[in-house]
Amino acid sequence: MILAGIEDEEKWLAEGIAAIQHNAFYLHRALDANNLREALKYSAQMLSELRTSKLSPHRYYELYMRAFDELRGLEIFFKDESRHGVSVVDLYELVQHAGNILPRLYLLCTVGSVYIKSKEAPAKDVLKDLVEMCRGVQHPIRGLFLRSYLAQVSRDKLPDIGSEYKGDADTAMDAVEFVLQNFTEMNKLWVRMHYQGPGRVREKQEKERSELRDLVGKNLHVLGQIEGVDLEMYRDTVLPRVLEQVVNCKDELAQYYLLDCIIQVFPDEYHLQTLDTLLGACPQLQVLPEFLQVEAFAKLSSAIGKVTEAHVEMPIVGAVTLYLSLLTFTLRVHPDRLDYVDQVLGACVKKLSGKPKLEDSRATKQIVALLSAPLEKYNDVVTALTLSNYPRVMDRLDNETNKLMAMVIIQSIMKNYTCISSADKVEVLFELIKGLIKDLDGTTGDELDEEDFKEEQNSVARLIHMLYNGEPEEMLKIICTVKKHIMTGGPKRLPYTVPPLIFSALRLVRKLLCQDGDAVGEELPATPKKIFQLLNQTIEALSSVPSPELALRLYLQCAEAANDCDLEPVAYEFFTQAFVLYEEEIADSKAQVTAIHLIIGTLQRMNVFGVENRDTLTHKATGYSAKLLKKPDQCRAVYACSHLFWVDDQDGIKDGERVLLCLKRALRIANAAQQMATVTRGSSGPVILFVEILNKYLYFFEKANPQITSSAIQSLIELINTELQSDSTTPDPAASAFFASTLRYIQFQKQKGGVMGEKYNPIKV
């Protein structure tokens, strides 16, 4: 079968050559007779033989060369206008009337060569026309040979620097543009031959394609010989355009051959100066297995090392860009080789060592890209934390960029929900983000933008919640590591970073409570007692910042956790600290109101205290409530204290007498507030305090507090009615609506019947 195919090709080739020779005979007779019409006729017939699709590239090349030789004589004839009597401009138009497109374009290229040489039109215009017209042939083999012919006849007529055809241009850009466009089209035609058929057919097709590669590569050789292609033009135009084709074609044969052409054609100096661009393209190629086989990383790493050592004066940005390109290549080709990644970072550190911290914005940007690349590749900061040279590279950044990079790291953790689960990695992580944790050398908190600072510290706070290990001992180590770092943050940072640490530690306390066995035993490495000691120290540092209101809240949170652990002395100590802060540090009246209600609410939920300790704390709370600055605040805090003496779900805390004392005291304070309003404003104040106290009476009435009677409620209702009807009372729609709603509730309970209905029945509304 194969033998028969070869014999057929030989036959078709022989027939084609015979036809070319036959037409060439009459072509020569026409040329000798200076007969243009006949010459065009027989040259078109001769060139029509190149329209065949029956020959392999190798055989087609033989046919093409026969026609090419004849075209040389035709070109000489076209040059001598006196022989054919037609101007080159008219001749350029005339040949475009040939019947078939392939002969027409060969003739057009031949005349175009003469047209350029005549200088009757700018070379760049003719070349642009020719390279565009050749798009008319899209058959891969025929198109490749046609464009190869165009490259051949035009190579000595390019508008290059120093060329007689350069025209008004001061650069070789027109010449470069022509060759690049021709190269691009030829590469597309060549790649189009890629065949995805059965194995044997595919192998034959790839062999045929390989035979044609030199046709495409000749364009790059022409580019290499253009005088005007200096380093700048190569770097900015030639290499990017060629690499674009190399990458986009996604063809292994084309990529491997064309990369080799680039390296062979252009000077080594150009390659050294554009190594970063070459490396940047490598990871996008289809030929990665070839790179793996030839130990590309070792060779490229060595090459970059030699470049940076040989060019001591190379700007830092240039060197860093090389390492960034090598790292990009490494992450694509060897994603599993973290030692390679670390090696690249280490080489970068070595280059930067001995120099001051970077101030060049371009170099800084490249360093950030270098550090961001592993994060983007692995989507896992934990992987980056294993790279010993990662923090060393970060240390080369200026303080502001160091913080920006720290934010990138935190954002990566948040985006990928990365859990940092060992104290060692937390140590490395906090060393990396130290620019956010504390003031670096040469900076002060005063220089920080307030909004940026808040965003940074909130990010650190969120990060702390991503540090977790299910083993209590390791989790405690993590908490201690975080504490060590954030305690250096200074007064502005601690209010942001201490609370998440406290809640992380409290989460560990509750985890210990849920474990089987003696979770609170003294012999365990991680015990609630030890954690509470750490918490006490941490909050104490916060209270001295000062941030007393926040510290008080955290003390109360810890007190609740100690209550859950049944650690009465610990809980009492936290309450003591909260009261000390209240007494000594919280002076603002609004803050005092908030704080006392927090204290009352937390104390109400405590069940760990014995009688003595609870009495002491409730006495303190009621005492502070009665000493608030404003009478309405006093009243509300005092009646809130009534709940400290009546807790439904706890046996023994149902002291009806003291509940009543609190409510009566609240009533006295409300009366005093009314009298003060009369003295200061000439009219009574709003009655809303009385309505609020009435609702407390109803609450304890329903809870079966024997001290709260229906007659006491009736008296309070009458008091409120009297106050509302008084001419001296300040109108208060909210208070009136609240009172009306309360009365409707009483009426509802009466109508509902049952035990509760009977209780409410004596009350007249």
Image (cartoon, rainbow, N blue to C red):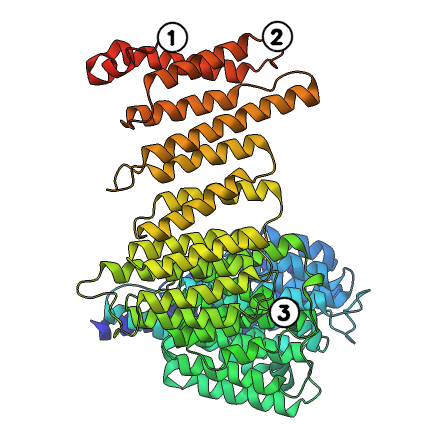
Element under disc 2? loop
Of the 4 image quadrants, the one containing the N terminus is: bottom left
Of the 4 image quadrants, the one containing the C terminus is: top left
Measuring from the top left, give residue 577's x and y in whole percent: 48, 58
Measuring from the top left, give residue 31's x and y in whole percent: 63, 67
Residue under label 2: 727
Marks 3 and 1: which is nearer the front? Answer: 1
Element under disc 3? loop
Q: Amino acid at mark 1?
A: Val
Residue at horizontal 71 percent and vertical 65 percent from the top: 174
Measuring from the top left, give residue 312's x and y in whole percent: 68, 89
Element under disc 1? loop
Residue at horizontal 40 percent and vertical 46 percent from the top: 602
Residue under label 3: 439
Residue 765 is marked as: 1
Q: Nearer the viewer, residue 234 or 2?
A: 234
Marks 2 and 3, how far apart in space? 63 Å
Q: Nearer the viewer, residue 281 or 644?
A: 644
Q: In the rendered view, would you say 6 is above or below 570?
A: below
